[in-house]
Image (cartoon, rainbow, N blue to C red):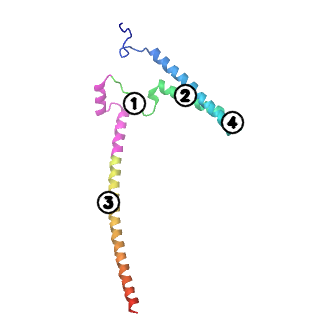
Amino acid sequence: MASTQPSTSTKKVSSEDIISQKTDLCISNAVVKTGIGFSAGVVLSVLLFRRRAFPVWLGTGFGLGSAYTDCERSFNPVAVPGVRVVPSNNSANVSASSSSPQTTFEKLQQKAGEAFAAAKDKTAQGIDKAQEKGAQVADKVEQKGSQAIDAAKAEAKKIEDKVRSV
């Protein structure tokens, strides 16, 4: 018997299916997170707040807010801080944009990266200089300490000789 199932790699998914999947995920996520927030509020209300209502409402609100944030990220991934959407069909354009930025934001991003790299290098150089200076100071302190110990030993020897002569 021949397999009549279509290949999953060549099958196109319609936009309505994508939206319905995201909506289903958001609704189920909202139900679960709201339920968890509600139950946490009930537990806190019973244990800590003498059966008052505000922990229940607060927990429910936190659950709904968390679910809303997740839905917003699902439907609008560009709104997430630090996420950059790059078109996948123009690989030559992407490599060209990495060598010479096209937009003002990319130019600023590159300048900030260069400034951070320069600051990191200067910080590393400063740390190296401070370590060298610290080693020099430690050597001087060690020399002074050994001189002081030698002087104390000589003084102790003089006092010992005086005591023995008496």
Q: CA distance from mark 1 to mark 3?
A: 43 Å
Residue sitting at x 35%, y 40%? 113
Q: Main secondary structure of the magenta part?
A: helix
Q: Which amino acid does the dot numbered 4 rest on?
A: Val
Q: Which amino acid does the dot numbered 1 rest on?
A: Arg
User: Which disc is residue 84 wearing?
Assistant: 1
The disc, 4 or 1, on the residue closer to the chain's N-terminal end is 4
Q: CA distance from mark 4 to mark 1?
A: 45 Å
Q: Residue 11 placed where, x, y %? A: 38, 13
Q: Residue beneath label 3, please?
A: 132
Q: Residue 125 placed where, x, y %? A: 32, 53
The disc, 4 or 2, on the residue closer to the chain's N-terminal end is 4
Q: Nearer the viewer, residue 78 or 40?
A: 40
Instruction: Count residues near mark 2 (Cα–Cα under 10 Å), then give few for <14, some for 14-19, many for 20+.
Output: many
Relative to 115, say whether 84 is above or below: above
Q: Residue beneath label 4, please?
A: 46
> Which of pointers 4 and 1 indicates the residue nearer the eye?
4
The disc, 3 or 4, on the residue closer to the chain's N-terminal end is 4
Give SS at disc 3. helix
Q: Which amino acid does the dot numbered 2 rest on?
A: Ala
Q: Residue beneath label 2, please?
A: 67
Q: Tally the marks.
A: 4
The disc, 2 or 1, on the residue closer to the chain's N-terminal end is 2
Give SS at disc 2. helix
> Which of pointers 2 and 1 indicates the residue nearer the eye?
2
Seen from this angle, which residue lies furthest front?
1
Q: CA distance from mark 2 to mark 1?
A: 23 Å
Q: Residue 27 placed where, x, y %? A: 55, 22
What is the quadrant of residue 144 in the picture? Answer: bottom left
Over which residues does the magenta segment extend?
A: 89-117
Instruction: Count residues near mark 1 (Cα–Cα under 10 Å), then give few for <14, some for 14-19, many for 20+.
Output: few
